[in-house]
Image (cartoon, rainbow, N blue to C red):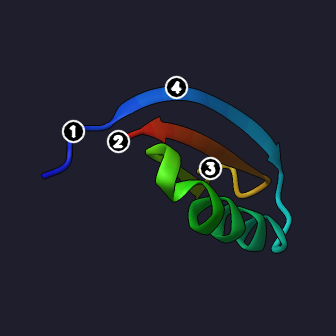
Amino acid sequence: MIPMRLLATKSFSCNDELYKVVDLLNKTLKEYNLMFGLSKNTDGQTMTLSIYEV
């Protein structure tokens, strides 16, 4: 398993387009050892973007 260090998180209102942004960030910044994740919160109204160093 790859060790990852959480650098930051930020919550946003739900938006289906955020997945496209995260995909672009992962593809573009992979060489900088950064990984981005997106999860829908249990309230169903917000999503959290996470930035990791890998």
Q: What residue type is labelled 1?
A: Pro
Q: Which residue shows up at 77% across the image and 65% down it?
A: 21
Could you tell me residue 44's position as x and y percent?
71, 58
Residue 37 against residue 53 in the figure, above or below = below
Q: Earlier in the sequence, mark 2 or mark 3?
A: 3
Could you tell me residue 32's position as x and y percent?
51, 45
Q: Mark 4 points at which residue?
A: 7
Q: Is residue 4 left or right of residue 28?
A: left
Could you tell me residue 33's position as x and y percent?
44, 45
Q: Name the residue under label 2.
A: 54
Query: Label 3's element?
Result: loop
Query: For mark 2, does the 10 Å Cα neighbourhood hold few (<14), some (14 to 19), or many (20 or more) residues?
Result: few
Q: From the viewer's perspective, is the residue at label 4 or at label 2 nearer? A: 2
Q: In this view, does 18 lie to the left or right of 50?
A: right
Residue 21 against residue 16 in the figure, above or below = above
Q: Which of marks 1 and 3 is nearer the N terminus?
A: 1
CA–CA distance in space, label 1 to label 2: 6 Å
CA–CA distance in space, label 2 to label 3: 23 Å
Q: Which residue shows up at 52% across the image and 25% down it?
A: 7
Q: Earlier in the sequence, mark 4 or mark 3?
A: 4
Q: Name the residue under label 1.
A: 3
Q: In which quarter of the image is residue 22?
A: bottom right
